[in-house]
Amino acid sequence: MLPTPEVGEWSAAEPIKEDKLAALDVVPLCIKIVSYAQPPKHIWANRTYLQLTGQTLEAFRAQDASAPSDSCSKVFAARYQHCQVEKKKLMEPADFSADDKPRERDNGVENMCVPVSLQYRTGEVEEGVMITKWPAEVKRNLEGSNKYMKKLLECSPYPLCLFNFNGHLITCNPAAVAVFGNTIWLQSDIFGMSERERCGLDPDQLKNHSASFTIERTERCTAYEAMMEALVEDGSSYQTDLMIRRRGGSGAEEFWYCRVFAQRHKDPITGEPLIMISHQDVTELRKVEGELGRMEMSANTKHDLMKHDSDVAGSLMVLLGEDWNFADDKSSGGEGVVSTDGKSETLTPRSMESTVSADSVNMGQRPAQLHGLRACLDKADEWEFNVFDLEKESDGLPLQVLCWHLFMKHNLIEEFQLDQIKLINFLRTIENGHQDNPYHNATHVADVMQSMHCLLIKGGIGKFVGKLEKFAGLFSAIVHDFEHRGFNNDFLIKTVDEWAINSNDKSPNESHHLSAAFRILRQPECDFMHRMNPEMKSKFRKMVIDMVMATDMGEHMAIVSKLKTEIQKRIENPDDEIGDDPPESLRILVMQGAIKVADIGHLYAELSVHIEWSERLEEEMWRQGDVEKERNMKVSFLMDRQKPGVTKSQPGFIDFVVRPLFETWVSCFPESNVLLDRINQNYAVWQTKEKH
């Protein structure tokens, strides 16, 4: 009784041209092409096969291809049915070689049968089966090589795993088993992605789901796609650091910081690409790096900043996936521990500023908090981002945490050789400089920056702007409301405020945001761009000024008009090609439009977030109205607490201010169409409220 052959799916390929067959002559495998349709026919064989069987190609073709026995008839019938009819691959053990001569059979190891179409020079196409045999000598060499590789795997102190390009585990060494144990994800995925995450990487799988089916964008998905782009050829490699889960000694699932090194190899038998993964635990290394960074920061910062260094250090440790235990010295007199009534308490990032009590966050809860923060940052690439969740999970430091995360994501620190310590000082100073307004505060700025980030990566503007514009766009979002006091430009001008005097009544708020931020940047301890050349710095400054000044609502219709004439009409005109390298003026206009869209991004947020921001804006406007009443001024429109406010006039605001901007924007950048859809959804809710 013959062993059962293995049948597999096979993708139809283009016909093999006759003049390309010579390439198979150099392959050290026995290959022949046979048609098993009646009458059976030998079509072609490569040089290795002919030498092994001691015959010429002409003799092979003239040879009778009929089955010499009943057992061979069954083999031939199976090959015909599976390969030529069903177009499937067929793997046969050596026992199936009954149709071959003894010399050939003794040297054969396994048959791989695949359907093939051969196109002759005349254009005629003939269907057949390509049968590949593994000679015994080749098998011995492969087995020797495999044993050697197996020994290397077994002796390695690092967890090593071998995956196919579908992301599924093939095998792993004892070190990997010892580290991961029976962790389920290791058996199915490289970076610990869930099946839902992996589904999001495959557009074909998404087609099988409803339109409401969404996939959360995670750091693991991003790393996986970056790895696949890097592993384009044999020997290419990729490295990244990720938070990965594993099963701890107690059986509970835990997270560790892992350095993943991937290298592309080739399966010596099938030729299919493989991925060798090495996992290295760098959790302790990260803690040391974070501590060194904190020490360096303290050594280079003035005394008035040194006492607050824990807030930023803690934020950065969070971003690195660590806790803040580095500040907890169990020994007496240890840094980071204070004594109150004989009780020791650990300082948290915010406790040193007395905004959160030291006992409000238990150190034992840090892993859970870090996991929550990481989950927030994983959603930073999505339109549905909830900045209030980030505010909570970042311990009240949403701007610093998100800025660092996005600067790393866009590779700005490396690209522009930014000074990391001075960048931290700058971000902290900017966040602390935002007043506790209901609306214009650091959380709003973080929200605008996240919206700008999304517009850059998936809003359609990436093809129009370069790295410097992206850097300037994110920086502009950071400083666009710096030191905002909660009053609009009209109020500042009417009251002859110092800001209005300094700006000659031209956009007092925006002018101050810019000048104050650039003064901070000029301070030696905050000048994180000191390595940039003067020409690039000057260009960067001009871009930032143009963008922040565009956030003045007094410039709203002018910007919308320019978007229509300079971009929309040119895009709609097939004879007016903008090209891959648009002029600088056009790039700046795109970024001006982007920051205006981002500045009112809450309009396309999920409903609860949008309503929260609307109510905050209403309260801030009422506070200005209160001041106007105290000064016996005429109370500005929508700013009287005794009359309907912003939340009662949203449909009109959307119709006359928001919709013209977004309709023009979507016409220019169709990738942003989802924003207009979401605005319309929120608009419908406001209309319903207005009717009732």
Image: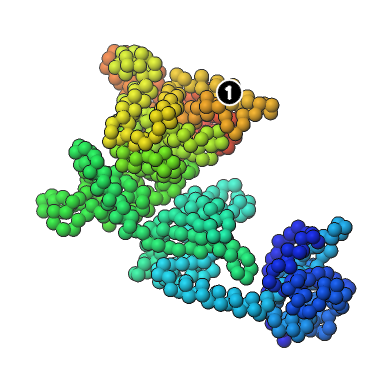
Quick check: 546 left or right of 396?
A: right
Colour approach in the figure: rainbow
Q: State whether residue 142 appears in this view.
A: yes
The image quarter in which residue 117 lies? bottom right
Q: Is residue 491 visible?
A: no
Image quarter of residue 247: bottom left
Secondary structure category for the residue under label 1 = helix
Compared with 295, 6 (above or below) is below
Image spot of residue 355 (x, y percent): 24, 40
Q: In the image, residue 49 lies at what x, y percent?
A: 75, 74
Q: Residues within 10 Å of mark 1 (few under 14, many from 20)?
A: some
Quick one: 330 or 26, which is closer to the camera? 26
Q: Depth check: 603 or 186 in front?
A: 186
Task: Please name whichever residue, 292 or 210, is drawn nearer the observer in this view of the structure.
Answer: 292
Looking at the rendered image, the quarter that the N terminus falls into is bottom right
Is residue 304 shown above or below 252? above
Left or right of 202 on screen, residue 281: left
- Image height check: is 197 above or below 483? below
Which residue is painted at 31% across and 29% down in the image? 522
| Residue beneath disc 1 | 566
The residue under the point 41% across, 50% down is 375
**Residue drawn at point x = 60 percent, y = 69 percent:** 268
Residue 436 at x, y percent in the picture: 30, 32
- How many labels sit on residues? 1
Please say if 557 is above or below 521. above
Residue 631 point in image, percent of width and height: 27, 14
The image quadrant of residue 133 is: bottom right
